[in-house]
Image (spheres, helix red, strand yellow):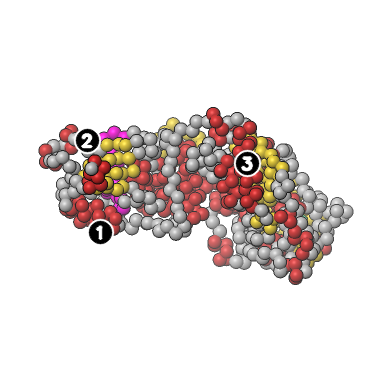
Amino acid sequence: MLDIIQLLPDAVANQIAAGEVIQRPASVVKELMENGIDAGATSITVRLKDAGKTLVQVIDNGHGMSDNDARLCFERHATSKISNANDLFAIRTMGFRGEALASIAAIAEVVLKTRTESNELGTQIRISGTKVESQEPESCPVGTNILIRNLFFNVPARRKFLKTNHTELRHIINEFNHVALAYPDIEFQLIHNNTQIFQLPSTHLRKRISGIFGKQIFQNLITVETDTSIVKITGFTGKPEHSKKTYGEQFLFVNNRFMKHHYFHKAVMKAYEEILPADHYPSYFLFFETSPSSIDINIHPTKTEIKFEDERSVWHILSAAVKEAIGKNNLAPTLDFSKEGVIDIPVLSKDQEIYIPKENINREFNPFETDEEKAFNYTRQKIDPDWQKIYEAKRNDDLSPGLGFDEAAGPKQEKFARYLQLRNKYILSPVKSGLMLIDQRRAHERILYEQYFESLKKGAVIAQNSLFPENIDLGPADYQLCLELSEEIGSLGFDIRDFGKNCVIVHSVPANAKIHDIKSVIETILEQYKNLNDELKLDQHEKLARSAAIAAAIPYGKQLDIREMQEIVDQLFACSNPNSTPSGKRILNIVKIEDLERYLA
Ligand code: ADP
Ligand code: MG
């Protein structure tokens, strides 16, 4: 079949969501791969230099273009995929706007070689910043070979906006995976700076998934299948025990197009509700098929946000299908996920105010020592009003223990147990006005956060505990993120090195954090970092300090001895804000003696 490219009539072009298609190298990769698919290719190779900033080349063996079309395809609204407004409701191709090549040609140097089967000789066309510089006959295989050099060479502001190679490559890998997952029967290759990242032969979905995410996932996939009049859903969902603390192996597709759909994500999570701890994510790879007229892929220029006609019904169908699949697999009732050590991830609301400590920590300060007045005056200036109340109490000697304890009489622990642990979760300590409750995990999170923030600022390396080196396998995108952050994570005391093939090797961890499960800690750091990335405009140090503190803080369920409790309390009170975690969760409070007395009244 020969594609004939035409310019969309204005009436149709105006109905299409116009937008900036090309934001980063990953958008180029995505658009070009989609063109290869639309051209019926069975093999697509992507080659990159410097995460696509210097070069993106996509080679497909699709039907190619005629000499004429090769020139026309760079015009805005030039497409062979739709021709009238009605076609917009029956889109089966990946592209349809006729914008991608025009947008790319406007901001890069392009060399296109292409040939159709009916032509013996192909054509080569060179374009730079929209200007056609040459077109000449070229002998080349059937298909299209397009080369994009020096992205944003004529838009310096945009070029400066590009992130590190690790980040840009991570985005590319994500886009590549979306396409590769949707078309397992097509062969794909991804090569970066002459290193092969993926070589994916033509296969079926389950094999394709494990080709991308590693062998271990192959046995951990449960088939999902349901067919209703509204939607057909097929694919796989992960066995609960394969769930991870990092988000990243969750994929939804509609008519073979990757989509972001928070609402449907919730539907899948609902199906796992009673099986997984709150901070675990199941992997899923789910494909919806529905009539193109019942969805609107036109609401967002990158085509990843898609509106469904009947979202609520699809939600229920999806949730039920996944739940049934898990049930059939007979896993649900037998699983025993220990809540021990489960991390309490703070939920950040968008409008929540973020506290960034500005002052240094006074490590000398301990409210239980003498010389209190000095310390008190030092600290009270930088505390929030709530905490001030507690300090007001302290001024009245309130924090000295009840029962007539005599400070001068000798070492504290020998006379009275000053701290008591409740449910391996709270530290209780008697104070004059009542009973102080401290959340052990949140307290430790605050302590670590301030230490980490400080050492990131200074670039000093926190003392390390070396380990027997431990290998950690990560998803391809998490792997890139981990490498990207490795230097800074290094100054927190994690010595992480590249081991190749989506694997890193950890040689040491911070000495102050009592880490048992390194993999889980690394995964948690990455996951937290990604969450903060999406939600808030925090700088990298802030995000990393918060993420690592959450990851390394002592969990609930950990039994503490008196000395450990003492240490936590001392360190907490030396923090610039002992009252709440960096994300604003309350760390401590005092139950007033009057309130206690009421219980006995
Ligand atoms: P769209 O994909 O939305 O139609 P593009 O700007 O991506 O717009 O491409 C314009 C046209 O160029 C396509 O409609 C198609 O006819 C042609 N084209 C682009 N890439 C290829 C390719 N790799 N093989 C064959 N034809 C292509
Ligand atoms: Mg296209």
The C terminus sits in image quarter: top left
The residue furthest front is 601
Magenta-highlighted stretch: main secondary structure?
A: helix
The magenta span reads: 560-578
- Residue 112 in view here: no
- Give the residue at mark 3: 320
Question: What type is the residue that disc 1 sits on?
Answer: Gln
Q: Residue sitting at 45 percent across and 40 percent down?
A: 521
116 relative to 534 in the view: left or right:
right
Residue 417 is marked as 2
Question: What type is the residue that disc 3 sits on?
Answer: Ala
Q: Residue sitting at 57 percent across and 53 percent down?
A: 168
- Give the residue at mark 1: 381
Marks 1 and 2, Cα distance to the nearest angstrom?
A: 31 Å
Question: What type is the residue that disc 2 sits on?
Answer: Ala
Dot in front, 3 or 2: 3
**Whether the residue under disc 2 has CB within 8 Å of ligand 2:** no
Foreground residue among 281 and 105: 281
Pinpoint residue 443: horizontal percent, then vertical percent: 33, 45
446 relative to 214 in the view: left or right:
left
Q: Residue sitting at 65 percent across and 61 percent down?
A: 299
Marks 3 and 2, Cα distance to the nearest angstrom?
A: 53 Å
Task: Compare marks 3 and 1 and give the one earlier in the sequence.
Answer: 3
Task: Compare marks 1 and 2 and give the one earlier in the sequence.
Answer: 1
Task: Compare marks 3 and 2 and give the one earlier in the sequence.
Answer: 3
293 relative to 549 in the view: left or right:
right
- Residue 341 in view here: yes
Give the quadrant of ligand 1. bottom right
CB under 8 Å between discs 3 and 1:
no
Magenta stretch encompasses residue 198: no
Q: How many marks?
A: 3
